[in-house]
Image: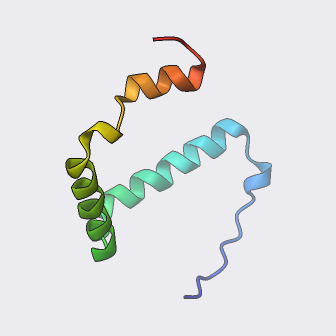
Amino acid sequence: MNHPAIDLPVDELTVDERLTLLGRLWDSLLDAGLPPVPAWHLDEVRRRMTAADSNPGASIPLEELRRERRGEQP
């Protein structure tokens, strides 16, 4: 899929201006409505949920994972 080139002088914007532009672009996407979720995404979510349900002991709570990543002891 080819997209037309958009020539914006982004390099000339300040960081604050770029963040504002990014926010406005993001908001415009949300205002336009969300795209449909592809079937393969839903299939993958179902697969992962089935795997998690079949072996609940294989996962750890998110806070525990965060502590481990920070090198903290429980």
Q: Which image quadrant for residue 15? A: top right
Quick check: 39 left or right of 13?
Answer: left
Give 27 or 49, whichever is nearer the viewer. 49
- Give the x, y percent position of residue 59: 35, 38
Which residue is depicted at the point 79% across and 50% down? 12
Q: How many marks?
A: 0
Quick check: 66 left or right of 58?
Answer: right
Where is the C terminus found, in terms of image quarters?
top left
Outermost residue, bottom side: 1
Which residue is depicted at the point 27% across and 49% down? 52
Decide: is 60 above or below 13: above
Quick check: 71 left or right of 51?
Answer: right
- Give the x, y percent position of residue 69: 56, 26
Decide: is 59 above or below 69: below
Give 10 or 43, whichever is nearer the viewer. 43
Where is the N terminus found, in terms of image quarters?
bottom right
Give 44 or 35, whichever is nearer the viewer. 44
Which residue is depicted at the point 73% across and 55% down? 10
Quick check: 68 left or right of 34?
Answer: right
Color style of the picture: rainbow
- Give the x, y percent position of residue 38: 31, 74
Q: Which image quadrant for residue 49? A: bottom left
Which residue is depicted at the point 46% across and 28% down? 65
